[in-house]
Image: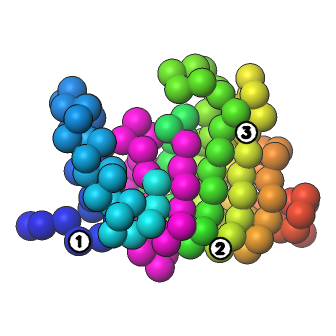
Amino acid sequence: MRPRTPEQLWALSRRLHRLGWRGPARLVKTCNYMLHKCLLPAEAAVGRDVVLEHYGLGVVIHPQVKIGDRCRIYHHVTLAAESVIGSDDFIILGDDVVIGAHSIVVARSNSTLTLGDGAVLGAGAVLTKSVPAGEIWAGNPARKL
């Protein structure tokens, strides 16, 4: 089966990266960007059944991100970590997390930011703090609703 969605291309890129084929992994990442205008790093850890809505248009994800199962990320979302690739600091999305369109999540340097299982981040939110499981946050700056 040929990859057709950004999720499938991302999975292929991650698989190539894990096998040590860094060049082909970067090539697939570049193709994904050219086709879908999303930056999805091969280094990110991604769970099962993650959905990038609207073909992941404009989604930008830092390599220091761990995404749980069944997460749903809408278009023009940025997950940015102010940390060096390979550090102990991450953005961690638990299982069943939803991130609305045009949201920005920034993990400050030397810190891990977590969105707990079932958390929801509303469209257009700017988040710099961790969100406990099951909570709904929105706004700029994001706060609990």
Which amino acid lies under the numbered mark 2 shown in the image of this protein? Ala
**Amino acid type, label 1:** Arg
**Protein image colouring:** rainbow
| 58 or 119: nearer the viewer | 58
* SS at circle 3: strand
Mark 3 / mark 1, whichever is N-terminal:
1
Q: Which residue is mark 1?
A: 4
Does residue 25 show up? yes
Q: Earlier in the sequence, mark 2 or mark 3?
A: 2
Q: Residue 105 appears at what percent x and percent y?
A: 71, 52
Q: Is 54 situated above or below 34?
A: below
Residue shown at 90% from the left, 58% from the top? 141
Location of the N terminus (image quadrant): bottom left
Amino acid type, mark 3: Ala
Using the numbered discs, state the Cα–Cα distance from disc 3 to disc 1 in whole angstroms: 31 Å
Q: Which disc is residue 101 wearing?
A: 2
Q: Position of residue 39 (x, y in %)?
A: 46, 54
Give the percent coordinates (x, y) of residue 37.
44, 66
Residue at the spot of label 3: 107
Dot placed on the residue nearer the N-terminal end, 2 or 1: 1
Q: Residue 7 lies in magenta, yes or no?
A: no
At 19% from the left and 65% from the top, the residue drawn is 3
Q: Which span of residues is magenta-colored?
A: 40-62
* Closer to us: 30 or 42: 30
